[in-house]
Image (spheres, coloured by chain):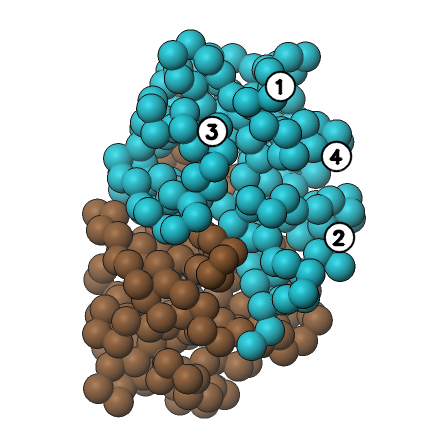
Chain colours: A brown, B cyan
Amino acid sequence: MNLNALYKLAYGMYIIGAHKDGKLNGQVANTVFQVTSEPPTVAVSINKGNLTHEYIKASRAFSAAVLCTATPLPYIGAFGFKSGRDVDKTKGVNFKIGQTGSPVFLDHATAYLEVEVGQEIDAGTHTVFIGRVVAAEVLTEDPCMTYEYYHQVKRGTTPKTAPSYIAKEKGGEK
Amino acid sequence: MNLNALYKLAYGMYIIGAHKDGKLNGQVANTVFQVTSEPPTVAVSINKGNLTHEYIKASRAFSAAVLCTATPLPYIGAFGFKSGRDVDKTKGVNFKIGQTGSPVFLDHATAYLEVEVGQEIDAGTHTVFIGRVVAAEVLTEDPCMTYEYYHQVKRGTTPKTAPSYIAKEKGGEK
């Protein structure tokens, strides 16, 4: 078995926004995908240890901003490699409060969605949140960043808490 | 709300293989994604009306072959716009029987996975099958086809039964 095959799966790069008791947070995710078209339904896989997980569970909603290829690595790093428990991720970035109350992070975003969570699937280390799209806008026609582009062109890395992390000894993150 | 935002989500292009009572079938899917890394766990969203859905439910397993950008449209069309109830999709294509008993379709594949289904999530028109990766191989280093490439470069279309179908009146499939 060669788990590098998992690197062949294609994803985008998203900033997931969520809120709880007036507090706001965001994190990078790559596993956002549509599960049905009628009604428009989207899922995301979030690590149970993440603050965003706690906020989505509490508010039963999240936003997903689709990042463009030009997104600077430090922007991704600020959302992806730091915890909202230690830093306020809304500082110095542009966002609006969406109709679900979730922060929608607007920098480098080509589009965004807001989702009201209908189902939570326990997938071990992660929860898959599934819900209906209640807001959606296209912001620019800039090309969207793929996970492959992030790794190969931007030379980005993956935190251990990501669904798509593959340990070095198993062939990943060389 | 502009549902074209859903087109900004990035996916790959996959041939899903499944079996039941010695019968084999395959279909195109774009919503294959990893949900956890330890253990390696993958999900796919399949329309309830599809024969592959019936086979995955019966065998509780599926394969996913990752298509390369060079995949000819007729190959995708044969798996994506025809039902295994009407035609034998294994005719004239290369495949092997994987360790789950699922057919693994090898033409134009850069990698494949086999998954033993652990959970089935009812998502209305579709079921999200989630399970552990039990086999995985990289076959080539050819670039993988993204759903965007399929639409923009290959000028491919989406059947109404796909999770990512957007009706014309809602801005999709122009």
- Whether residue A98 sits left or right of residue A142 in the image: it is left
The mark that comes first in sequence, 3 or 1, is 3
Say which element carries label 3: helix
On the image, the x and y values in percent for residue B27 come to: 55, 31
Q: Residue furthest top?
A: B22
| Residue B14 spot, x, y in % from top left | 56, 36
The crowding category of the residue bearing disc 4, from other C-alpha atoms within 10 Å (few below 14, some 14 to 19, many at least 20), is: some
- Whether residues under marks 3 and 2 lie with C-beta atoms below 8 angstroms apart, the answer is no
Helix, strand or loop status at disc 1: loop
Confirm whether residue A82 shows in the render: no
Residue A103 in view, yes or no:
yes
Of helix, strand and loop, which one carries label 4? helix
Q: Which residue is mark 3?
A: B52
Q: Amino acid at mark 2?
A: Gln
Q: Residue at x 62, y 19 (%)?
A: B87
**Between discs 2 and 1, the one toward the N terminus:** 1
Task: Identify the secondary structure beneath mark 2.
Answer: helix
The residue mark sitting in front, 2 or 1, is: 1
> Which residue is denoted by mark 1 in the rendering?
B87
Q: Amino acid at mark 1?
A: Val
The image quadrant of residue A69 is bottom right
For mark 2, does the 10 Å Cα neighbourhood hold few (<14), some (14 to 19), or many (20 or more) residues? few
Query: Which residue is denoted by mark 4 in the rendering?
Result: B73
Image height of A31 relative to B95, above or below: below
The quadrant of the picture occupied by the N terminus of chain B is bottom right
Alpha-carbon distance for marks 4 and 2?
Answer: 13 Å
* Separation of marks 2 and 1 at Cα, in angstroms: 28 Å
Position of B32 compared to B69: left or right? Answer: left
Q: Residue type at mark 3?
A: Thr
Q: Which residue is mark 2?
A: B152
Q: Nearer the viewer, mark 3 or mark 1?
A: 1
